[in-house]
Image: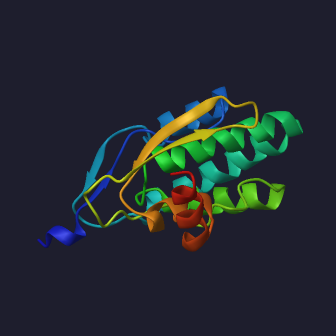
Amino acid sequence: MRLDCVRFYKTDIYHPESKGIKLFIEQKKLNKLIVDFNGNNQIRDENLHQLFELVSHVIGGMSDVDQAKESEAFFVFLISDPRRDIGAYLRPLLEYFHNLGYLKFKKHIYNDNKQKVVRYKVEFKNTEGTVLKVKLYSSLAQLSDDIGKKMTSLHYQLFKMN
């Protein structure tokens, strides 16, 4: 067996508060740590797509204020725990938020960090000034991927304050 065929599926999945969604996640065992040695993720991807359908329906029924709060929660999830294993769920959900007018700056669900040296500490705040997440970055490219600004403008903004 080749090790590059082994896939690990972690337990935490972003979703809005809903009993139906929680029940679906439990029934499909999406909340369980799974090690897939066979690489048969088609069934899991189908379940994740069904989860997207449920979640988008719940979010679509929310008010604009609640949708904005959910978009913040989803953004924090994306930058807190980069997940390739549930891309079949996260990609369409990010597109859905884009269609609603939220998170237009966020282009990717996964931010690949290629460096180990931490150089920047960034506080993410909402419009009320509440700190949503503090994250450490190794490069401006990594930060740029999360916030959607060009690296040159970030570099200028970051170092202009010094």
**Residue occupying the point 65% across, 28% down:** 130
Does residue 69 appear in the picture of this structure? Answer: yes
Relative depth, front residue between 93 and 145: 145
**Residue occupying the point 56% across, 73% down:** 152
**Residue occupying the point 35% across, 54% down:** 119
Relative depth, front residue between 152 and 53: 152
Q: Position of residue 136 (x, y in %)?
A: 40, 47
Disc tally is: 0
Quarter location, residue 73:
top right
Q: Position of residue 62 (x, y in %)?
A: 84, 36
Does residue 109 appear in the picture of this structure? Answer: no
Up/down of 20 relative to 108, above or below: above
Quadrant location of the N terminus in the rendered image: bottom left
2 vs 101, left or right, is left
**Residue occupying the point 48% across, 34% down:** 26
- Seen as rendered, the residue at the extreme left is 1
137 vs 47, left or right, is left
Q: Position of residue 65 (x, y in %)?
A: 84, 34
Up/down of 112 relative to 129, above or below: below
- Seen as rendered, the residue at the extreme front is 162
Quarter location, residue 72:
top right
1 vs 130, left or right, is left
